[in-house]
Image: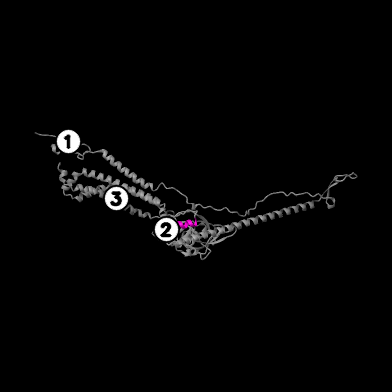
Amino acid sequence: MKHESHINITPDTPEVLSTRNLSGMDRKVTASFNPIKKWLVSLFITLCVIVIAYNVMSKSSGKALSVDSNKIVISPVTSGIFEDFIPVRARVTPAKTVFLDAIEGGRVEKILVEDGSSLKAGDLIVELSNTSLQLNVLGNEARVAEQLNNMRSIELNLEQNRLKHKSNIIDIKHQIKLLTRTLKREKELLRLPEVNSVTFSSEAPSQDNENNRGFKLLEPHEGSISNKALSMNQYNMGYGFFEAYKIKPLAGRLFDENFGTDNIKTVADGEVGQASAILNKSALKKFGFGSAQDAIGKTLATHIRGKQHLTIIGVIPDIYFRSIKFGIRASVYTQNPERFNVANISFTTNNISSLVSSIEGVWKNSVPMQPINLEFLSEMMAAQYNDEKTTAQLFLVFSLLAIVIACLGLYGLSAFTVQRRTREIGIRKVMGASIKDIVTLLIWQFSKPVLLANLIAWPIATYIMITWLERFPYRIDTFWLVPICLIVGLFSLIIAWSTVGGNTATVARKNPVKSLRYE
C-alpha cells in the first residue's frame, strides 16, 4: 500500500525545499523561537551600554568652579600731585576804595558848589580823580593776592610731599616686613629634613594666568621694533626658582641675590627704577634678536610699581607653564617679592602625609590668617589634559562598543549564511575541497563589505582628526594618519576573519553525509 505524507515548511525554517515521500519517522522538527527571550537579552545589553556611557561621561561633568583668593589682587589707591594746568577767567575787585582829596593831586571831575555859595562842615565841594594812583593801588592789591596764592600753593606742595614720603616709608616698611616674613617662612621650611629646596614665585607651572604688560626695547638694533611697546606675559620668580626646576640659561645668568640689583622696587612719580629681567626664547625672537647673547645687557622700559628700566641679564629656553595645546607665550621674568603667591617646595620622602602636616604647621605659624592650598606639581600638570583624557576614554569606550556590536552582527550574518549554504559546503567537500578552501572562500566573501566600510570611513575619520589636531600648536604630521588608517583597517579585517572563520570552520568540519542525506 502506497503511503504519502506532506510537511509544510514555514518561512523561518532553513529548509526551503518541500519534501515528499518521507516516512513519519524522518520528519524535520523545527526549533521553537521565543521572542520574549530575545527582547530581554536586548534590553540587558542596552542597559549595560547606558551605564558604561554614563560613568564615563559623568567624569567630565559636575565640576564646581572656584576662584582662589590668591588670584584676587587688591591694588592700593595712592595720592599724587595734580600737575595739569586749568585756566580760570576772573575779575579783580579792590577790597576797599580810597577817596583822594585835593592835596593828593589829581583832576577835578565835577564841581558840586557854585562860587559864593554858603557851606557847612561836611558838604562836598568838588569830585577829584587820580587814575595813576588808583591803578597803583589795584596793582599792589593784585600782587599781594598773587603772593598769598603762591604761599598757599607752596604749603599744599609741602603737605603733598610729606604725605608722599610718609606713603613711601609705609611701603618700604611693608616690603621689609613682607621680605622678613618670607625669609622666616623659607628658613622654617628648609629645617624640615625631607625638604631639599624652597623657592617663591607669582605662580607655579601649569597655572594658566594672563599677566600681559608692554615692554619697549630702548636700544634699537637691526630687526627690532624700536618705536613700539610689545605685549608680553610677565612672571615674578624668586631666587633659585630656575635652579629648582633644572632650567639652565642659554646666555647670561639667572637671578642671584649676591648682585642686589635684580629686585623691582617701588619708585615715586618722575623717578625711574632699575632692575633685572630674563627673557624666554619666544620673547627673544619677538624682539628680533639674532642670538641669545645679543640680548644680554639691553634695556627694557615698562611700568611695574612705577616706571622701570629692566636690564636683560639672561635668556632661558621656553617653559611650558600651561598645556601645550595653547602654545608658548613670549614671557619676561622679573624679581618682585611683593607678588609672590606660591612656595615651590622640592622634597624627597615616601611619607607624604607627615610632610604635608609639617608644612601646614609652618604655614600656620607664619601666616595664621591665610589658608594654605597644597597641590602636587604632577597632579597640576595632569589636570591640564583632563579634557583630552576624557575624550580619549569616550573614544575608547564607544569604539569598543562599536566593535562588539559589529562583531555580533557579523557573527549572526555569517551563521545565517553558513546555515543556508550547508548543502553547498557538503557538496564542495564531496568534490574534494578542504576545510581551508571552504573557510577562505567564505572569509573572502565577508571581507568585501568590511573593506568597503573602511574605504568609506577613512576620509571621514581623517577629516575629523585633522580638525581636532588643529587645536594644538604642536601636533603630529597629518601624513601619519595614512598608516594609522591602514593599521585600523587591517585590525578590523582581522576581527572580521576571526569572527567568521571560527563559525565557518565548525560547519566545514562536519560530515557532508549529514547535510546531503536528503539529496
- Whole-Å distance between the Cαs marked 1 and 2? 85 Å
Judge left or right: residue 301 versus residue 486.
Answer: right
Q: Please tell me the numbered disc located at residue 355.
A: 2
Instruction: Specify whether residue 22 is in view.
Output: no
| Residue type, numbered disc 2 | Leu
Q: Is residue 9 magenta?
A: no
Q: Position of residue 1 (x, y in %)?
A: 8, 33
**Corner quadrant of residue 515:** top left
Image quarter hosting the C terminus = top left
Of the image marks 2 and 3, the number of the one nearer the N terminus: 2
Task: Please state which of residues 262 and 29 is positioned toward the viewer in this rendering.
Answer: 262
What kind of element bears circle 1? loop
Q: Position of residue 476 (x, y in %)?
A: 38, 55
Q: Please tell me the numbered disc located at residue 7.
A: 1
Judge left or right: residue 316 versus residue 142.
Answer: left
**For residue 259, above or below residue 212:** below
Q: Confirm or deny contact between disc 2 and disc 3 (CB under 8 A).
A: no
**Label 1 crowding class (10 Å Cα cut-off): few <14, some 14-19, many 20+?**
few
Q: Chief secondary structure of the magenta span?
A: helix
Q: Name the residue that disc number 3 marks.
A: 492
| Residue type, numbered disc 1 | Ile
What segment is highlighted magenta in the picture?
357-367
Q: Is residue 366 magenta?
A: yes
Q: Residue furthest left?
A: 1
At x 49%, y 51%, the residue is: 69
- Whole-Å distance between the Cαs marked 1 and 3? 44 Å
**Label 3 crowding class (10 Å Cα cut-off): few <14, some 14-19, many 20+?**
many
What kind of element bears circle 3? helix
At x 21%, y 36%, the residue is: 10
| Residue type, numbered disc 3 | Ser
What kind of element bears circle 2? helix
**Corner quadrant of residue 165:** bottom right
